[in-house]
Amino acid sequence: MSETPRRLLIVDDDAGLQSQLRWCFADYDVEVAGDRESAIAAVRQGDFAVVTLDLGLPPDPANASEGLRALREMIALRPSSKIIVVTGNDDRANALQAIASGAYDFYQKPIDADVLRLIVDRAFALYTLEDENRRLQRRAATPLEGIITSAPEMQTVCRLIEKVAVTDATVLLLGESGTGKELLARAVHQLSPRAGERFEAINCAAIPEALLESELFGYEKGAFTGAVKQTIGRIEHANGGTLFLDEIGDLPPTLQAKLLRFLQERVIERLGGRATLAVDVRVVCATHRNLQEMIGRGQFREDLFYRLTEVSCAIPPLRERSGDAMLLGQVFLHRFAAAHGKRLSFAPGALDAIDQAPWAGNVRELENAVKRAVILADGKQLSATDLGLAHGDVDNLLLRDARDKAELHVLSRALARADSNMVKAADLLGITRPTLYALMNKFSLR
């Protein structure tokens, strides 16, 4: 079990109290901030387990508005951090408002170091448990080597790959360019009984039609001008292992019939040869094209399509993977910054811009954008402009808004499916009828 860093942020404008708390929490990695702006900057730079936040911050320390604003922004940036608000004796109403806004706990001045220490230690213990749980979930959610995701849409794909990998079924991977089709093809191989054998990949769109047949099936000496020796093809070379045919939608019609025969009979003939050779190979294909539309236009054989789709797996584009763009952006930033000996972070709005971008080139485009920005970076932060993106809207990260949208979406679907039958809708949602009525009132659905 990896140890959670004991990082504590103290937000208070009293220099004497800052020193006292530094001494009190000497066994923590303590950072201090004296106002809202510096506190938010610190939170953006580091992942603090616990934050103690004085609600009375400048420029208006007699009022809690600045502290409550800081609280909301911290929760939006680091929802997992445990924030303990510190208030005056006569400020209980604001303390309760802070708890309602998402603070973990509150403590009233004057400071009793032992009591505050107990509250912070308890908050850190809870954060540690939740942090370990998040790590376990990430490990369970991304079992395939090279696949980085926290999105439910991709977790479903990963589970499908795990199930089919142990069989010998032919797999067709469908998805836009840059979605990770080859990574998933390699995962099929690595999780299969053939993992110790060869993984042979060939891009059907990258090789001229005149050469593709000999590349796939090989040729005998003298089969054509320049064939000075016998050469085995990629299919034969992959014997015992896995053959990955990328961009299968670009396979010329003349080769589709020959590939179909191989898939049916599991034998090949080299160009210029007469002997049939049995080949034991697992076939995985991928394409960004719509093969069924191509069938309708007479560009792809229907019988071959059904041979290739013993198992079909549709890979969602990055724009449809909840939260993955931001997750991958962080991963790429750390990877490329380390490779170039730089210490960089994302500036305010950059992650939001990453999350909102369409990413037509998917993961590959995002990776290239971050790598280019890291290489050209002059400062310590990468902005949306550095990434070639429009500025993002930080307000879109507010958890309450996101939760309300999700609740309304699920509630509306359940009511529609139940044909407005309250008992059935409650059963579909796994809640009681009073809870259902409360939700309906909340969203004015009655």
Image (cartoon, rainbow, N blue to C red):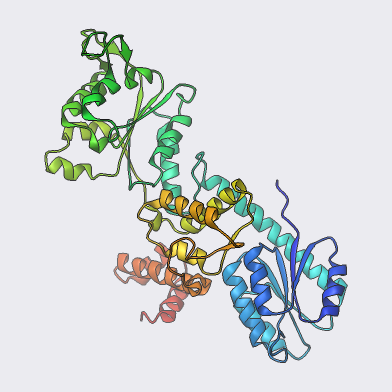
Q: Nearer the viewer, residue 186 or 381?
A: 381
Screen quadrant of the C terminus: bottom left
Report the front residue among 238 and 426: 238
Residue 272 occupies which quadrant of the picture? top left
Q: Is 52 situated above or below 130?
A: below
Q: Position of residue 51 (x, y in %)?
A: 71, 70
| Left or right for 207, reference 398 | left
Q: Is residue 142 left or right of residue 83?
A: left
Query: What x and y, as percent, mark residue 63?
Result: 69, 91
Picture quadrant where residue 173 is located:
top left
Task: Inspect this view and state whether residue 26 appears.
Answer: yes
Residue 150 at least partly seen: no
Examine the rendered structure and indicate whether residue 8 appears above or below residue 5: below
Image point 31% across, 9% down: which residue?
Answer: 229
Residue at image location 24% in from the left, 38% down from the top: 249
**In the picture provided, is 275 more to the left or to the right than 428?**
left
Residue shown at 55% from the left, 69% from the top: 348
x and y, in percent, of residue 140 in the image:
55, 45
Q: Residue at x 19, y 32 (%)?
A: 252
Q: How many marks?
A: 0
User: Is residue 177 placed above or below 394 in the rendered structure?
Assistant: above
Is 377 rendered above or below residue 113? above
